[in-house]
Image (tube, rainbow, N blue to C red):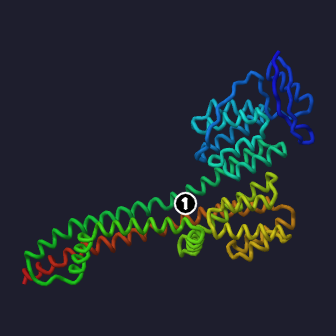
Amino acid sequence: MSFYQYTAKDVSGKSVTGMIEAASEAEAASALHKRELVVISLVSSKQRKIKKVKGGKIKQDDLVIFSRQLATMIESGIPLVQALAILSEQIDNRLLKDITMAARQDIESGTNFCDALAKYPNAFSDFFINMSRAGEASGTLDEVLDRVATYMEKISSLTRKIRSSLVYPAVVITMAVLITAVLLLKVVPTFKGIFSMLGGDLPLPTRILIGVSEGLRHYFPFVVVMFVVLVVLFQRYTSTEKGRYIFDKVKLKAPVLGPLFRKVAVAKFARTFSTLVKSGVSVLNALDIVSKTAGNKVIEEAILNCRGAVREGEPISSPLSKSAVFPPMVCRMIGVGEQTGQLEKMLTKIADFYDDQVDAAVSGLTSMIEPMVIAFLGVIIGGIVVSLFLPIFKITELVAR
């Protein structure tokens, strides 16, 4: 027989800790279930302590797997501490493995699951912590963790769509800049020597091209330094509150990408808010978390203003519509959800709708960018080639006469 320290919740949701004597861990868990207790942790008194670790950044894909597997084991009736022990043996990410083992030790000592994870803010976001807290308090931790995994998968998918749509034009434009630089720095000076030997007046486009080439060759280090300085200054400016706000405002009003950024922001807002509300997080707390995960200062300000108005007794839809950031349809659907008591359902519909809108916008953007990039390449590189060959054409005409 061995003694096991347990942490459990009774039928009223109150945390209960104590010691129980049993022949095995399974027998101890069975005895506690007969007492109508929901086992959170069950640890042998001989359990070895685990060293504390420091938290760091963890990839979202690893957190998705962690959440999904932990939810499955808890749903299967495996005690939380035992589930974390199993997970710690399977996780490939060394940092997440260490955090899981340390969290297990804290829970064995009587700490709540959410409080154990809250010690690692770089690894687990406010969203993850608050969702876990709501699930733990309501006794539905497995369902909440499954929702967290689904949410992170959808947000990751949304992010990948945006990045993939910008990879092609970024690569093509970079190649175009490199090719143009090689032509101006290496090819044009060679042709300049040939033109000097032939003599005569050069056509205006050729003279302009040679002037640009000469200027770039003489001032190339200065141009590079200025570019680096401008990039650093821009990063420092956008790292300030005012600079970030102005930059995010410009992003939302940009002629081509602005509507896409707005749709992505609305989809993320609705998905995050819906997941939090569905999991039992209070509206005020949910709005605070949503504002921190918005990724845009303009939208963050609108959500925080909404939170303040809701605290004063206003419905959510009213301050959102006044912000002019969220589309009227979104505000009306949220208003209907509030009136009918189906806010979470309406938010999910909004998120699904705007996910489809983002898909369509990304496809349209890709289709539009391709011909624009080709036209850009044709004008720049084609213009350089034509300017180089104009004198040769002129000489050929003179010789033919």
Image vertical order of residue 156 relative to residue 288, above or below? above
- What residue appears at the point 74 percent right and 32 percent down from the top-left corner? 81
User: Where residue 41 sits in the image (x, y, percent)?
Assistant: 79, 32
Give whichever of 330, 284 is nearer the camera: 284
Image vertical order of residue 200 relative to residue 138, above or below? below
Give whichever of 392, 72 is nearer the camera: 72
Image vertical order of residue 85 relative to residue 180, above or below? above
Quarter of the image for residue 223 reads bottom left
Q: Which residue is mark 1?
A: 162
User: Where residue 213 sits in the image (x, y, percent)?
Assistant: 24, 73
User: Where residue 150 sits in the image (x, y, percent)?
Assistant: 69, 49
Quarter of the image for residue 273 reads bottom right
**Local secondary structure at mark 1:** helix
User: Where residue 29 sits in the image (x, y, percent)?
Assistant: 83, 26
Dot 1, how many residues are within 10 Å of its Cα: few (below 14), some (14-19), or many (20+)?
A: some
Image vertical order of residue 140 relative to residue 104, above or below? below
Please state the total of marks drawn on the protein image.
1
347 relative to 219 in the view: left or right:
right
Q: Amino acid at mark 1?
A: Ile
379 relative to 242 in the view: left or right:
left
- What residue appears at the point 80 percent right and 43 percent down from the top-left corner? 136
Q: Quadrant of the N terminus?
A: top right
Q: Quadrant of the C terminus?
A: bottom left
- What residue appears at the point 23 percent right and 78 percent down from the top-left corner? 211
- What residue appears at the point 82 percent right and 65 percent down from the top-left corner? 337
Q: Residue furthest top?
A: 1
Quarter of the image for residue 390 reads bottom left
